[in-house]
Amino acid sequence: MNTAAVTITYKVPVRRHPVRLFITQQPLGAAGLIIIVLMAIAAMFAPWVAPYDPLAINYNAMLARPSAEHWLGTDSFGRDVLSRIIYGARTALAVGFLASFIGSTIGAIVGVVSAYFGGKTDMVIQRIMDVILSFPIIVLAITVVAVLGKNIVFGLDINLVIAIGLPMVPKVARVVRSSALAIRELPYIDAARTAGFSHLRIIFRHILPNVVAPYLIMLTAFVAQAILAEASLSFLGLGVTEPTPSWGLMLSGAAADFYEQAPWMIVFPGLAISLAVFAFNLFGDSLRDWLDPKIKL
């Protein structure tokens, strides 16, 4: 009796790089990421990218129209608008990232602690979060800036960063708390308690690492809000002060007086703010859908 040989082949799945996978699955998020990277590069290498010194005053070129010499025109002091926008990206990104990192990190810790201990601890923490949530982000930021004043460290107002980051804490805390509540009931958490591990070890070693996905999503999403809040506070005179380049500061003061004669003083800084917020929103939404589609901000 003849028996035919049977050959079985197995197709090994090809593992794709996470970055390439994100680009193919989330093209809009990838576009936002490209804009963010370009802005970050321009901010980091501003002395080589900017055509002029952003603080240099040229009274012979006051309110000059966009031209080959000044691509985006000049302001009422003859300062190059393009150079100030490029240097303003440093302020926007630095404040945006730091404020979002501080607010998201504190919120994540608060959310995990609230979920882990539960009971009265959870109730007290959540009522405090409710009080903070009752204030609009700008109103709360203005209050904190007015109370703390200015504290310049390495050219950055730390109190401004705190004022913008504080309103983010309750929103992150609630999202992370919902994830931590499910993790708290898993068997390995009970095993850690039975083994006699301390609360701090369980929280920082067994729970926090498992809420990284919602933390990263909120961190990225809130950078756009932080940039917008910094621009708003600077516009109101409570953020960055002259002569430091800031997108919000460029929209206030003399720009409001010359908006008919020199509209480029308002249009281009406004476009820079809109583009940055748009890019971070695109990237944040795509990252949310990619990492955890169940999370809704």
Image (cartoon, helix red, strand yellow):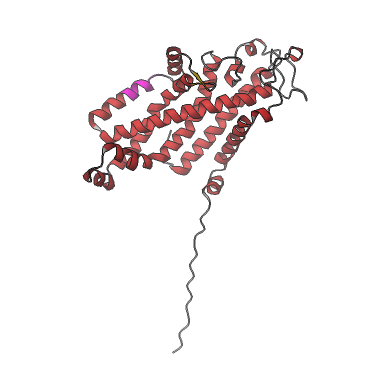
The secondary structure that most of the magenta stretch takes on is helix
Side of 74 where 297 appears, left or right: left
Q: Residue at x 53, y 49 (%)?
A: 21
Q: Position of residue 126 (x, y in %)?
A: 31, 27
Side of 265 where 215 appears, left or right: left
Residue 295 visible to the viewer: no
- Asked whether 137 or 163 is in front, the reply is 163
Q: Quadrant of the N terminus?
A: bottom left
- Asked whether 215 or 149 is in front, the reply is 149
Image quarter of residue 71? top right
Q: Where is residue 207 in the image (x, y as percent from the top left)?
A: 33, 40
Q: Residue at x 34, y 42 (%)?
A: 205
Q: Which residue is drawn at 35% across and 32% down?
A: 109
Residue 141 in the image: above or below residue 113: above
Residue 149 visible to the viewer: yes
Q: Residue at x 37, y 21 (%)?
A: 132
Side of 203 where 196 appears, left or right: left
As for residue 166 lying within the magenta part, the answer is no
Give the residues in magenta: 128-135
- Asked whether 229 or 99 is in front, the reply is 99
Image quarter of residue 120? top left
Q: Position of residue 35 (x, y in %)?
A: 60, 35
Residue 11 in the image: above or below residue 165: below
Residue 121 in the image: above or below residue 12: above
Number of residue marks: 0
- Asked whether 104 or 152 is in front, the reply is 152
